[in-house]
Image: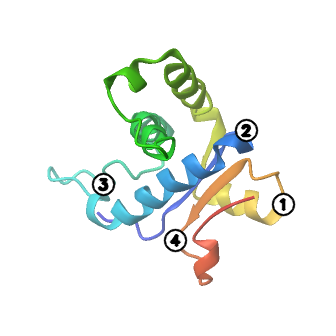
Amino acid sequence: MRIKELKIALKFGDNDFRDLFTEIFATMYDTWGRTSWSNDGNEGGLFTEDKSKIAWLIRSLIPAYYAMQDNMDDKLNIEYISDSKFINAVDYAVSLVSEDRIMVGSEVDDLISTTTWANSEIVIINSASEDYERIIYTL
């Protein structure tokens, strides 16, 4: 069964990674319509309120998205992704994603209603928003 509204927030706590997580959430939103069900009839697919699945998905995307974002001067090659600077940055970004930092469903509604600013350290998908600028954004 398809999830009617996708509401996920991540309190990642380091605004240096705002663009990384915003891009990952944009991809999650874009693919939500195609992957919010599974072939075996189980409800939800990856987009459920199961925070372990959401955390797994986000952590899985970090290395590729970090490499793409940091590839401003065409340095993406095996030496680059083997370099300790890249590995340490990816490991740190992965460490920012845990189940206790993820909110889903009504938890996102509560967060939105109680938080007006968080130094761009929270990223949100709210597919129920009627304001296009408030479907994927940071607080």
Check the image and name the residue furthest to the bottom: 130
- The circle on residue 127 is 4
**Who comes first in sequence, dot 2 or dot 4?**
2
Distance in Å between CA atoms under marks 1 and 2: 20 Å
Q: Which numbered marker is on residue 58?
A: none
In the rendering, which numbered label is found on residue 114? 1
Which label's residue is closer to the chain start, 3 or 4? Answer: 3
Q: Amino acid at mark 2?
A: Asp
Tell us which disc is closer to us: 2 or 3: 2
Q: Nearer the viewer, residue 92 or 128?
A: 92
Could you tell me which secondary element the residue under label 3 belongs to?
loop
Q: Are marks 2 and 4 in contact (CB under 8 Å)?
A: no
Q: Which residue is mark 2?
A: 14
| Disc 3 packing (10 Å; few <14; some 14–19; many ≥20) | some
Cα distance between the residues tagged 2 and 3: 33 Å
Indicate the amino acid at tag 3.
Answer: Glu
SS class, disc 1: helix
Q: Secondary structure at mark 2?
A: loop
Residue 97 in which image quadrant: top right
Q: State left or right for residue 2 relative to residue 14.
A: left
Colouring chosen for the image of the structure: rainbow
Residue 63: % across, % down: 43, 33
Compared with 41, 50 (above or below) is above
Q: Residue at x 83, y 59 (%)?
A: 115
Where is residue 22? Give x, y as percent.
57, 55
Which of the two discs, 1 and 2, labels the residue nearer the N terminus? 2
121 displayed left or right of 50: right
Q: Position of residue 48 (x, y in %)?
A: 42, 51
Q: Which mark is residue 43?
A: 3
